[in-house]
Image (cartoon, helix red, strand yellow):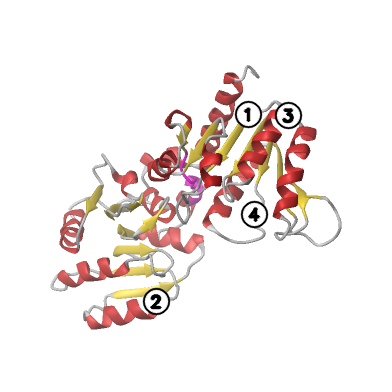
């Protein structure tokens, strides 16, 4: 299948959650041998209009990120010339979705829009225009799907497809040291690590150990809070770790605690749950982590530090695992299949299959 991906800005320009999600989709299809093209602003040196990297052909629609207007004007005609089977557009910025819609009409191809929602879904004219143009909208969670519907999208065209993980990779990593509770996230203003530290402080008369994985501008403040709560000798701040070391840590840990106040999809938590951790989620209106543990006997939803402390105690009665096949459906191959199902469905609806 030939798929034309549209993303003015890519992960090669800027490393953001939205760009990484979109890059992952390109890689999933390239790995499977599909004909993958990405129409973007150029990010490479030299005057070539196309470059190929890891099975993905990148097309320079504009010269750099300063030429957004040029990108939007040229995009429809480049898509029409390419005649792809499906066009898949990043919805950030939303202006590129109507431009991709015109290209899809010229190419007689269905349009899928990817709405990751990192940073929210702004209520602007361009957003409302973008939500009404695709044949399907894909979101990483029900939370983001709700945001998109609130901006005018038809609920019947919104599909939820999660971020993928590599289950074979988890099984291949040796478990790390035993730890009772682990937390992993960038330590910024949205981390809300204080909820977990306060809950652990309520259990200071119990025997437990905790590890915090991640770095960021709030790390010093959180380390000081651990000292103020007199639990610093039982909480290890491990800093940023590569994926292999994080997986090892998750396979050795018993509980993964997710307390972030904003999260469109809890990818680190998913790695940890598949690696056998019990999941404890503090519910927040702008976070989707609770969706992973709903209806699961190894998952807990909490709303306060007291609830969180009680859940940590209750989790101690559950068996320790180093892998959980309940999450096999989140493997890269399964997520790629879900995208293929979306593509084939919109092709059938337009009489193209």
- State whether residue 79 is above or below residue 317: above
Query: Dot 2: within a 10 Å radius of its alpha carbon, few (fewer than 14), some, or many (20 or more) residues?
Result: some
* Bounds of the magenta segment: 161-169
Residue 145 place in picture, x, y as percent: 42, 40
Residue 202 place in picture, x, y as percent: 15, 70
Q: Which mark is residue 123?
A: none
Residue at label 1? Answer: 110
Q: Tell me, yes or no, whether the two marked residues, 3 and 1, touch with CB atoms within 8 Å.
A: no
The quadrant of the rendering that contains the N terminus is top right
Q: Tell me, yes or no, whether the two marked residues, 2 and 3, touch with CB atoms within 8 Å.
A: no
The residue lying at 20 percent from left, 67 percent from top is 199
Residue at label 4? Answer: 10
Which element carries disc 4, helix, strand or loop?
loop
Q: Earlier in the sequence, mark 1 or mark 2?
A: 1
Nearer mark to the viewer, of 4 and 1: 1
The residue lying at 70 percent from left, 46 percent from top is 72
Residue at label 2? Answer: 219
Q: Which residue in the rendered view is the most extreme toward the front?
A: 125
Q: Tell me, yes or no, whether the two marked residues, 3 and 4, touch with CB atoms within 8 Å.
A: no
Distance from disc 1 to disc 2, alpha carbons, whole Å, reads 46 Å
* Residue 268 belongs to magenta span: no
Distance from disc 4 to disc 1, alpha carbons, whole Å, reads 22 Å
Residue at label 3? Answer: 107
Distance from disc 4 to disc 2, alpha carbons, whole Å, reads 29 Å
């Amino acid at each position: 299948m030939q798929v034309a991906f549209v993303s003015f800005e890519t992960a090669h320009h800027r490393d953001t959650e939205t760009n990484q999600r979109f890059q992952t989709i390109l890689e999933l299809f390239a790995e499977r041998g599909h004909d993958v093209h990405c129409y973007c602003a150029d990010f490479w040196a030299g005057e070539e209009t196309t470059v190929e990297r890891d099975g993905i052909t990148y097309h320079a629609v504009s010269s750099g990120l300063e030429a957004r207007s040029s990108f939007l004007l040229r995009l429809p005609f480049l898509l029409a010339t390419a005649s792809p089977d499906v066009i898949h557009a990043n919805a950030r910025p939303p202006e590129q979705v109507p431009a991709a819609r015109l290209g899809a009409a010229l190419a007689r191809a269905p349009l899928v829009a990817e709405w990751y929602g990192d940073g929210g879904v702004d209520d602007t004219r361009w957003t409302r225009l973008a939500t009404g143009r695709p044949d399907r909208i894909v979101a990483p969670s029900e939370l983001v799907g709700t945001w998109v519907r609130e901006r005018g999208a038809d609920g019947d065209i919104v599909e939820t497809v999660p971020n993928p993980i590599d289950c074979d990779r988890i099984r291949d990593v040796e478990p790390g040291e035993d730890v009772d509770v682990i937390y992993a996230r960038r330590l910024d203003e949205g981390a809300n690590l204080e909820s977990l530290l306060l809950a652990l402080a309520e259990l200071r008369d119990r025997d437990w150990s905790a590890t915090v994985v991640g770095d960021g501008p709030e790390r010093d403040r959180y380390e000081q809070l651990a000292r103020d709560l007199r639990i610093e000798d039982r909480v290890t701040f491990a800093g940023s770790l590569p994926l292999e070391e994080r997986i090892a840590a998750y396979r050795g840990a018993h509980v993964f605690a997710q307390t972030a106040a904003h999260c469109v999809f809890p990818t680190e938590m998913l790695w940890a749950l598949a690696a056998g951790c019990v999941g404890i989620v503090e519910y927040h209106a702008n976070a989707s982590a609770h969706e992973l543990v709903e209806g699961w006997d190894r998952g807990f939803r909490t709303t306060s530090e007291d609830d969180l402390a009680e859940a940590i105690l209750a989790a101690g009665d559950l068996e320790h695992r180093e892998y959980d096949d309940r999450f096999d459906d989140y493997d890269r191959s399964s997520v790629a299949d879900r995208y293929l199902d979306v593509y084939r469905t919109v092709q059938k609806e337009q009489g193209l299959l």
